[in-house]
Amino acid sequence: MQDNQPITLPVIVEDEMFVFPFTIAPIFIADKSNIAAAKIAEERDDTVFVVCAKNNHKDKENEIQFY
């Protein structure tokens, strides 16, 4: 690991879209924990880690029944 990399990063969990690594895209956040993560990154003038939420099993069952 490089010396200039942070040990911890604020994390934003994105429910509605997928963002490819190293891309610039608008994200819309309303969840309190995601807003807090964005504020921490802004205060530090640092990187934020954006991840996609995984569907739970109930969603998967509904998809199978739908198709």
Image: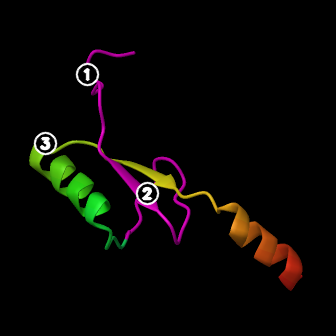
- Point out residue 32 in the picture as x, y percentages from the top left corner: 26, 65
Instruction: Note whether 4 is above or below 24 in the view shown.
Output: above
Q: Earlier in the sequence, mark 3 or mark 2?
A: 2
Main SS type for the magenta part? Answer: loop
Q: Nearer the viewer, residue 26 or 33?
A: 33
Q: For this view, does 42 lie left or right of residue 13?
A: left
Disc marking residue 33: none
Residue position for label 2: 13
- Point out residue 57 in the picture as x, y percentages from the top left corner: 72, 62
Disc marking residue 4: 1
Q: Nearer the viewer, mark 3 or mark 2?
A: 2
Residue 24 found in image quarter: bottom left
Residue farthest to the left? 43
Q: Residues within 10 Å of mark 1 (few under 14, many from 20)?
A: few
Residue position for label 3: 44
Q: Nearer the viewer, residue 15 or 50?
A: 15
Q: Which residues are magenta?
A: 1-27
Residue drawn at x 52%, y 59% as measured from the top left:
19
The total of numbered circles placed on residues is: 3
Q: For this view, does 20 lie left or right of residue 56?
A: left
Could you tell me the amino acid type at mark 1? Asn
